[in-house]
Each structure stands twice: as structure tokens, then as C-alpha cells.
Amino acid sequence: MAMDAVFRIGVQWLHVTAGVLWIGGGFYTILVQLPALLASPPAARGAIMPTLVPMQFRYIFRVAEFTILTGLLNLFASGRAQELTRLDTRWSWAILTGIILAVGIYAFTRATIARWAYRLVEVGPRAASGDTAAAAEMPQLAARIRRFGYIQLLVGALIILAMVTARLS
């Protein structure tokens, strides 16, 4: 096997693995972690959030960035980057759609969910100490995060569909 084929397959493997970690991390966060956190007593939430939120976002953002980076690298490793400017193939449309959706959801996550989650960290201790306004804000923030999280999961599924379409084109 030629060295360029090994490199191409390695980049593809890294890209797919990072994508699974990114989208899978979103599923885990929205379907398991957030409901479990909301089911715990407010005092426990206030204690864990300052540690959990930064770690969660470092992980999600790094695998998202690595997914996007290896996806772009994969364009060049595959030798098909020049096809991206031609919009007459399913492959080019699928790849462009995937790139736009991935970069878009990454940017929106940075702009919205991260801000809301850090607000939860800020409000959590006040809610745990009996501040009624802070306690009322907590479920609203969690609902926003959950709602956007479901949108993020849908977009992730569309990205996977676009990549499968590209692979089969």
C-alpha cells in the first residue's frame, strides 16, 4: 500500500472518530448528563457545575475543532479538493453542506450554549443558597440548552447523512 493511501485512510479514520466523539458527546450531554444533573438537588448541582461545565466544553470544542480540521485535511488527502468548486456532483454538494453545517453548529454552540452553561455556573450557587430569582432562572437556562441541544443533534444527524452521501457518491 502506498504511503499516500495510508495517510488518506489515517486522516479519514481520525475524521470519522472525531465526528463520532463530537456528535456522540452531544447525545450524551443532552440525553443523559443534563437530565441527571437537573434531577439532582440544587446544592449538589451548584457544587459540580463549576468543574463540569468547563471540562465539558473543552472536550466538545476540541473534538469539534479536530473534526473540522481533519475534514478539511481529508479533502486534500483524498485528492478531491478541486471538485468542491464544481457544483455539478452530489459529492460536492454533500461535502459543502457538511462543512457549512459543521462550522455553523460549532459557531452557534460557542455563541449560545456555552454562554448559557456558564450562566448556569454563575447562578447555581446563588440558587443553592436560596436566591429565588436565581432558582427561577436555572430551569429556563436548562430548557434553552436542551432545546438548542436537540437542534444540534438534528444538525449532527444531517452532517452524518451528508458525509454518507458523499462517501457513496
Image (cartoon, rainbow, N blue to C red):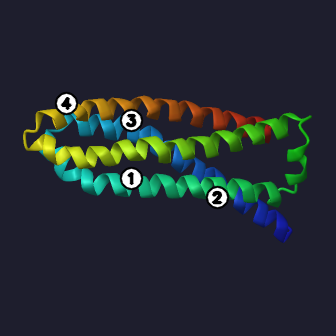
Q: Is residue 142 above or below residue 65?
A: above
In the image, residue 111 sits, relative to residue 78, either above or below, namely above
Residue 14 falls in which quadrant of the image? Answer: bottom right
How far is mark 3 from mark 1, CA to CA? Answer: 14 Å
Which is nearer the N-term, disc 3 or disc 4?
Answer: 4
Does dot 2 land on a helix, a strand or a loop? Answer: helix
- Of the residues tagged 4 and 2, which is closer to the observer? 4
Identify the residue position indicated by label 3 in the image.
145
At 25% from the left edge and 50% from the top edge, which residue is drawn? 49
Residue 74 is left or right of residue 115, and the answer is right
Camera-nearest label, 1 or 4: 4
Q: Is the Cβ of the residue at disc 4 closer than 8 Å to that at disc 2?
A: no
Q: Which of the pair 161/151 is nearer the observer?
A: 151
Q: Secondary structure at mark 1?
A: helix
Sooner in the amino-acid sequence: mark 3 or mark 2:
2
Spatial CA span between label 4 and label 2: 43 Å
Q: Nearer the viewer, mark 3 or mark 2?
A: 3
* Residue with the mark numbered 1: 56
Between tags 3 and 1, which lies in front? 3
The residue at 51%/30% (across/down) is: 151
Where's the N terminus, which quadrant? bottom right
Residue 35: x and y in percent read: 29, 34
Q: CA distance from mark 3 to mark 2?
A: 28 Å
Foreground tag (3 vs 4): 4
Look at the image and tell me in which quarter the C terminus lies: top right
Tag 4 residue = 136
Residue 97: x and y in percent read 73, 37
| Nearer-N-terminus badge (1/4) | 1
Work out whether residue 29 or residue 127 is closer to the camera in this orientation and state it.
127
User: Residue 14 — which label?
Assistant: 2
Under circle 3, the secondary element is helix
Tag 3 near tag 1, CB within 8 Å: no
